[in-house]
Amino acid sequence: MMVSEDSVIVPLSRRTALKRDWDEICSYLVNRLSLDCMYNTKEHKIHFRTNEETEETNAMQKSRNYIDAYMQGFRLVDCVAFLRLDNIIVESFNVNDAKAVLKGANQSRAIGRICGVNGDIKNQIMDCTRTRIVVAGKKIHILGTPANNAVARRAMSQLIIGTKPGKIITNLQTYKERQV
């Protein structure tokens, strides 16, 4: 069996979280996917490779997606979905993709509409579409199935454009009822 290697750069904003969760991250890679992993503290990279015990053919891709999602800001328990399910993806878009003329205070207000008071609107979008959302500055990352990601992205784009949150939540609840 041929050994394949890969590495992921750890951004400065995620180094503290990585130190806190390193044991769990490593145990998932070693126990579930039978990969070897290490963290290079000088280069700030996570290196992982296959070994003789690795049986899954897509173990490297799963581990790459798992670590990339964690580096984008998703919680570790949400990232584990990459190891269990096959049809999970992370979709990212910029706030300016929905409305290109946003700048300054208007852009901050648009991001605030996505989050809502105490994260209420964001949590309702996540609940209705069965996705996970991370708002990191101007970037928005969505973790879920492609169909659910599209619905969540459409809802957030409508919020950015200026549609009232109540209307969007009503549409999402209708979508949720149809899915059940």
Image: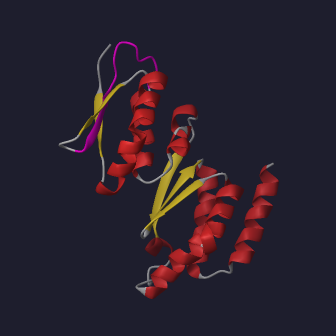
Q: Residue furthest left?
A: 42
Front residue of 133/172: it is 133
Q: Is residue 157 visible?
A: no
Residue drawn at point x = 53 percent, y = 79 percent: 110
Quarter where residue 167 is shown: bottom right
Relative height, residue 79 to residue 134 (above, below): above
Asked whether, in this view, residue 4 is left or right of residue 115, the answer is left
Residue 104 x, y percent position in the rendering: 40, 85
Q: Could you tell me which residue is drawn at 60 percent across and 58 percent down? A: 150
Q: How is the image coloured?
A: secondary structure
| Total labels drawn | 0
The residues colored magenta run: 44-57
Q: Is residue 50 magenta?
A: yes
| Residue 154, x across and y down, in percent | 61, 66
Residue 45 is situated, as x and y percent measured from the top left of the image, at 26, 42
Residue 176, quarter of the rendered image? bottom right
Q: Position of residue 14 (x, y in %)?
A: 36, 52
Query: Quarter holding the N terminus?
Result: top left
Considering the whole magenta stretch, tell me its main secondary structure.
loop
Q: Residue at x 64, y 62 (%)?
A: 123
Residue 111 falls inside the magenta stretch: no
Residue in front for this viewpoint, 18 or 9: 18
In this view, which residue lies farthest toward the bottom?
Answer: 105
Q: Is residue 169 visible?
A: yes
Residue at screen point 49% across, 51% down? 74
